[in-house]
Image (cartoon, coloured by chain):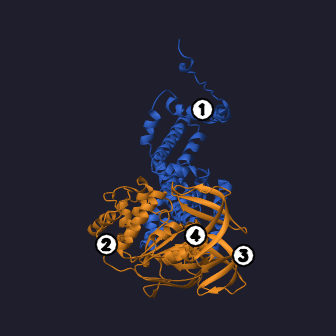
Chain colours: A orange, B blue
Amino acid sequence: MDAVAVPVVAKTVEFQGASVVLTGIEKRFDTVGAVRGVSLTIGAGEFLTLLGPSGSGKTTTLMMIAGFETPTQGDIAIDGSSIVTLPPHKRNIGMVFQNYALFPHLTVAENIAFPLRQRGVDRVTRTRMVSESLRMVRLPGYEARYPRQLSGGQQQRVALARAIVFRPRLLLMDEPLGALDKQLRESLQLEMRRMHADLGITFIYVTHDQEEALTMSDRIAVMNEGRIAQLGTPEDLYDRPCDRFVASFIGESNFLSCIVVGTEGNMVVGDRGGTILRALTGSLPSAGTEATFTMRPERVRFADAQFSTTRTNRVWATVTETIFAGERRRYLCRCDGGASIVVKEPSSTTTRRRMEGERVELIWSISDTVVV
Amino acid sequence: MIPAAAVAVPVRRTVTLAPVLLVAPLVAFMLIFYALPLAAMLSRSVSDPTWTLENYRRLAGDTVFLRVFWTTLRTALAVTIGALLLGYPVALAMSRLRRTAAGVVLIIVLLPFWTSVLVRSYAWMVLLGRKGLINEVLIATGLTDTPLKLLNTSLAVHVAMIHILLPYMILPIASVLRQMDEALPRAAAGLGAPPWNVFARVTLPLSMPGVAAGVLLVFVLSLGFYITPALVGGPRDFMLSMLIAQQVDLLNWPYAACLSATLLAATLLIIAVFQYLPGVRDVLKTVPR
């Protein structure tokens, strides 16, 4: 049942997703601020992910949209009308919980029919819609099972079926794949993307897994300490992280501190003990200040004689450690002047393996360098 | 010759006597002071004056016994229903309180446990008497001229027994509710269920093992109640245990033994039935006794 192959499912439901607008929402528990001023506009039909470490306020934000928590301050509007005073059962939002929250005393069919019964859908229509949504999550014929008779992945699918069967225009998901193993998680990620495309409804997805966020989302809001640290497309966040937190939370990053000596167009020029480095930046720090330049390990290469372009940064370093990790090899290098730089090289039997203690020149593109 | 490796070396099973020795004193105690007297009592119901089932046959047509047995069942049933109706909301509240607040409520619920049944029954006599606290207040506020008859009524028996047995109802239900995944009622609300439906379709059905355990405990304990109905009840609240005591006083040992055996059998039957309800056994383990 959990195979990776994804059959094409006909577009059965034609309706639009809802737009969601959060305006300066805050949530304080006692005096501790869990969410400290989040403003966010989510477009109709968008797949938006709230990504952050535990305690960053991402789940609390989701719970406020669902109605299980009331904001201390701020407003939440769906399709332009405020919902903060509406109790959860009147919000008409689909939700998938972390541990699925399937009703253990009800069968799969009864679980999925639950939201339909609450809406007064008649028995015949209920039965039809239940089997329709079970087909949608590729579990046809599982009506009579109880949740405890299903595997984790199957329970997850039932939870998904239950959350979409009443055709909500907004679906909230709180780490829905957290309890599953890596392979299953990856196949379900693909399926959720497909379902998002098929249903055309708005998805708000909460996760602490940056890879998952990058794979699935249209846009990601990275949260840290109750605030949105950065909002953007996966490429935006990966290639142009706005600060050190985002740079290290999404993917892996190298950090080099420099003294800013000036700017050339939209480039910042930094001096690192005699070595000149250049970086792209949105803001232009003033000369004389210290700035941190960051770049991704897989974009750093060993400079060979034939490899030489002008728009690059170069530093000399010593290899201190090499780790083979299957698809790639990681080199830990100690830069002249102190900082350490990680280099990821696609593993290959033809590339020369660098030895520990070897002197190397590292090279990477200026456009892959960002000031944070 | 057989190669050495092929010879199966018998693993010496070391039977350790320690666990047996540890429980031995208690087993001996229970045998001497519980099992033996019970066996003697049971045998007396069929062997006095000669081996016969006559005692039991007489019981079936004995109107006094049947009336008392019915009173006992009726009282146990009323107390169980009363305790359930009063206890469930308390258990629900306990499950929704924060940890510290729930701890305080738990202590309040458990307080009656630490006071003797005798003391509590006397307390009810003080409250319910003709010149008791309740009548004094009613007269002082002008709600009634003459004191109401509260003591020595079935109502008094029910009230006092419910008071004493409430913890047995509250604790198993609260224990089940506390262990319930709090995402479940949330999920129900999120799927469109108004608060009453969340309770009726999710919370209540999922707490049924706790309800069954509480009902079992209260009902079984009610069947054997003696002191409370004797002190606050009237002549119509004559329970089986009181009949047994009376027959012992009259030195009618075979009849008393026969009644005891019947009460024991009825109790065991009820426990046996409830033990087979799903989940009940697990809940019973969590209740302090």
Q: Secondary structure at mark 1?
A: helix
| Location of residue A278 in the rendering, given as x and y in whole percent from the top left corner | 62, 79
Of badges 1 and 2, the one in the foreground is: 2
| Location of residue B246 in the rendering, given as x and y in whole percent from the top left corner | 58, 44
Chain bearing tag 4 is: A
Q: Which mark is residue B36?
A: 1
Residue farthest along the left direction in this orientation: A124
Q: CA distance from mark 4 to mark 3?
A: 22 Å
Q: CA distance from mark 2 to mark 4?
A: 53 Å
Q: Are marks 4 and 3 on the same chain?
A: yes
Of badges 4 and 3, the one in the foreground is: 3
Q: Are marks 1 and 2 on the same chain?
A: no
Say whether residue A47 is visible. yes
Nearer to me, B147 or A260: A260
Q: What residue is rendered at 61% in x and 36% in y?
A: B34
Q: CA distance from mark 3 to mark 1?
A: 97 Å
| Location of residue A182 in the rendering, given as x and y in whole percent from the top left corner | 48, 58
Chain bearing tag 2 is: A
Q: CA distance from mark 1 to mark 2?
A: 64 Å
Circles 3 and 1: CB atoms closer than 8 Å: no
Q: Which mark is residue A274?
A: 3
Q: Secondary structure at mark 3?
A: loop
Q: Secondary structure at mark 2?
A: loop
Of marks 2 and 4, which one's residue comes earlier in the chain? 2
Q: Are marks 2 and 4 on the same chain?
A: yes
Side of B141 where B52 appears, left or right: left
